[in-house]
Amino acid sequence: MVSFVAPSVPLNVILIATASTAITVSWEAPSMPNGNIRSYRVTVYLLDGEFRTDVQVTSTSAVLHGLQPFTNYSVNVSAITVAEGPSSDPETVLTLQDGMHKYFTM
């Protein structure tokens, strides 16, 4: 009998509002991947708990578009090997007001 162990929780989830309708989400791989990470699921909710969207990505970041301006969102991330692990604790972010963009310089 083969047993599958899901990965642990992704670490250090960071949310940045980059536009009025977009956020960038980044995180670190789980400390216990329990196999090869095939993808990550990023799930977005309104703060009242209403589901908005989820995406699967293979990197440790995602840019989510199509959100509402100046709105609070809750985001969590889970890792997937042959099984999906538990979601990270929800983090919250407020999208920017219409017409505003956040620019980064290094």
Image (cartoon, rainbow, N blue to C red):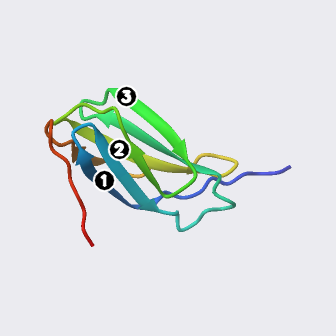
Horizontal side of 96 relative to 9 (left or right) equals: left
Q: Residue at x 15, y 35 (%)?
A: 98
Q: Is tag 1's residue or tag 3's residue first in the polypeptide sequence?
A: 1
Report the residue marked by disc 2. Answer: 75
Where is residue 23 shown, x and y percent of the image?
31, 46
Identify residue for label 3. 51
For the residue carrying disc 2, how many other residues have a C-alpha within 10 Å: few (<14), some (14-19), or many (20+)? many
Q: Are marks 2 and 1 in contact (CB under 8 Å)?
A: yes
The CA span between labels 3 and 2 is: 10 Å
User: Pointer 1: residues within 10 angstroms few (<14), some, or many (20+)?
Assistant: many
Name the secondary structure under disc 2. Answer: strand
**Does 76 sit left or right of 101 as displayed?**
right
Residue at the image position 38 percent from the left and 41 percent from the top: 64
**Marking on residue 106:** none
On residue 15, which mark appears? 1
Q: Which amino acid lies under the numbered mark 2 shown in the image of this protein?
A: Val
Amino acid type, callout 3: Phe
Q: Which numbered disc flags the more N-terminal residue, 3 or 2? A: 3
Of the 4 image quadrants, the one containing the C terminus is: bottom left
Name the one closer to the observer, 16 or 90.
Answer: 16
Hey, which quadrant is residue 43 in on the image? Answer: top left
Can you give x and y, in whole percent of width and height, for residue 99 in the image? Answer: 15, 39
Is residue 106 at all visible to an observer of this figure? yes
* Other-residue count near label 3 (Cα within 10 Å), few / some / many at <14 / 14–19 / ≥20: few
Q: Residue at x 35, y 44 (%)?
A: 75
Secondary-structure class at tag 1: strand
Specify the quadrant of the image occupied by residue 19: top left
Outermost residue to the bottom: 106
Taking 35 as reference, is 95 left or right?
left
* Whole-percent x, y for residue 72 in the image: 21, 38
